[in-house]
Amino acid sequence: MTEEQGIEYGDEGNLAERVADLLRVDIATVNNDNNTSSKPLFSAKDFSVFDHLHSRGRAATQELSEYLSAHPGSELLDIGCGIGGPARFIAERFVCKVHGIDLTKDFCETAILLNRLCGLDKRIQITHGDACDMPYDDNHFDTVWTQHTSMNIADKNTFYSEIKRVLKPGGTFLFHDIFSNDALQTDEERQIHLPVPWASRPEHNHLVPGEVIRDILKDLGFHREIWTDVTAETHLWFHNYNGANNGQNTLSKDLNPTLFIGRDFPERAKNLKKNLALNKISIIQGVFRKG
């Protein structure tokens, strides 16, 4: 499958159908609006072995959520929601309304399928759209959330300005993202080994130093509350990571990042690990509040 801005994820179309086959469910029945099955076939946790498409997986989502203040009346936007793992985690844990937006149509269709399979489709709304031109009203969301999204987007000012636009005054922006190491001084030093999970070619890679993002957010009127470097924890996680084994016998072993990122995912993961070891990139958890 090919994402509209040229970032390539996966190897074939009809991702939702492929996932349904691997889960041994009939996609037409699941997507039937008249389907009134009272008990979901799965829980959100069942999918957590494959549906958090970022470093440290569900553990990183749970860790970032410790900074989240949400309740049943809250509305949260997950930008770059992928196949919906974090959205389901948040909707289930905080019983709030979650909106997810992603530029990759196959991811959105798969997220909708998985939401229905675990009975969370009434709490989660998925939109196929552009993070730099979002179809939401101004000052709408209590919280905006992103994980491993910024490095896909070239126009940082528009991206973060859109986050400010849709976030309520006093609302919180939480992120878990990849940046260039602030200590690197030259373009040559910042050059990373490719391919990596988010980019196969240099023109797809939009990493910038974390200090650039801090300055952009400050200029937009955001107040920094948390800036935590979790690079070391991420490096350790990759050292022990086996992307071909989801660790749960009840689900197909084919439900792993290779299905969603592409057949060359092992090479991409290897290069990400190498870039971490060479201190070329930093993994940051951040919490900022809109003034």
Image (cartoon, rainbow, N blue to C red):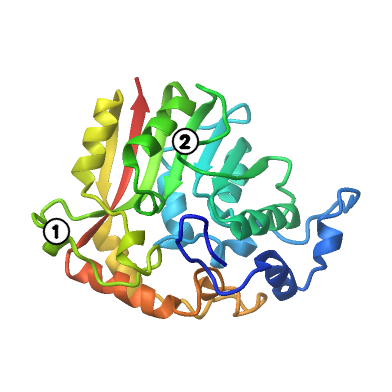
Dot 2 falls on a residue whose secondary structure is strand
Badge nearest the viewer, 1 or 2: 1
Residues 132 and 210: in front is 132
Give the residue drawn at x 68%, y 58%.
114
Give the position of the C terminus as an image quadrant: top left
**Dots 1 and 2: beta carbons under 8 Å?**
no
Residue kind at label 2, given as amino acid type: Val
Is 78 situated above or below 183? Answer: above
Residue kind at label 1, given as amino acid type: Asp
Whole-number angstrom distance, CA of label 1 to CA of label 2: 31 Å
Q: Image check: 290 left or right of 26?
A: left
Is 20 situated above or below 141? Answer: below
Residues 214 and 243: in front is 214
* x and y, in percent, of residue 160 in the image: 37, 35
Q: Which residue is mark 2?
A: 144
Dot 1 falls on a residue whose secondary structure is helix
Q: Which residue is mark 1?
A: 187
